[in-house]
Image (cartoon, rainbow, N blue to C red):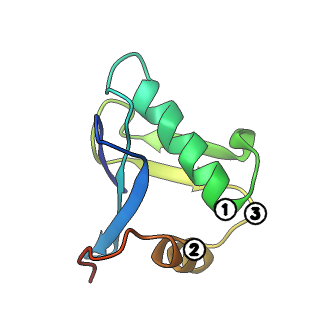
Amino acid sequence: MRVAPRSQRNEAVGIENGVLKLRIQAPPAEGAANEAVIAFLAGLVKRPKSSIKVFRGLKSRNKAVRIQGIKALELKKLFENNMSKGENHG
């Protein structure tokens, strides 16, 4: 997952080379962006925040996230259905 912090809004923006791309309003300081990613994904997959963990990339734009109870293909489909209009994805 690729995250762009300090964006105007929290949104799914695309999939590039199999990598999900998010925009998050929170700054990349003191874990705020990681918490925002978890909150955004929890809303997207309709699961509690406690079921989502950023396990790699805590201080990077490139993050690996584990979500209990959902398969990668299901997440990709939910992501595609919630992407901002007009954005490229591939």
Check disc 3: other Cα within 10 Å, few if <14, some if 14-19, many if 20+. few
Q: Which x, y percent locates residue 61?
A: 27, 42
- Is residue 86 toward the left or the right of residue 68 in the image? left
Badge 3 is on which residue?
69
Amino acid type at circle 2 is Leu
Q: Residue at x 46, y 77 (%)?
A: 80
* SS at circle 1: helix
Q: Are marks 1 and 2 in contact (CB under 8 Å)?
A: yes
The image quadrant of residue 84 is bottom left
Amino acid type at circle 1 is Val
Task: Give the number of the mark in front: 1 or 3.
Answer: 1
Q: Of callouts 1 and 2, which one flags the residue occurring earlier in the amino acid sequence?
A: 1
Quadrant of the image containing the C terminus:
bottom left
Q: Of callouts 3 and 2, which one flags the residue occurring earlier in the amino acid sequence?
A: 3
With respect to residue 17, does 36 lie above or below?
above
Of the numbered discs in the image, which one, if any, rests on residue 78? 2
Q: Are marks 1 and 3 in contact (CB under 8 Å)?
A: no
Check disc 2: other Cα within 10 Å, few if <14, some if 14-19, many if 20+. some
* SS at circle 3: loop
Q: Which x, y percent locates residue 89?
A: 28, 79
Count of numbered circles on the image: 3
Badge 1 is on which residue?
45
Q: Residue at x 42, y 55 (%)?
A: 11
The image quadrant of residue 25 is top left
- Is residue 35 toward the left or the right of residue 18 in the image? right
Amino acid type at circle 3 is Gly
Q: Which x, y percent locates residue 17?
A: 25, 76
With respect to residue 36, does 11 lie above or below?
below
- Is residue 76 toward the left or the right of residue 70 in the image? left
Q: Residue at x 71, y 56 (%)?
A: 68
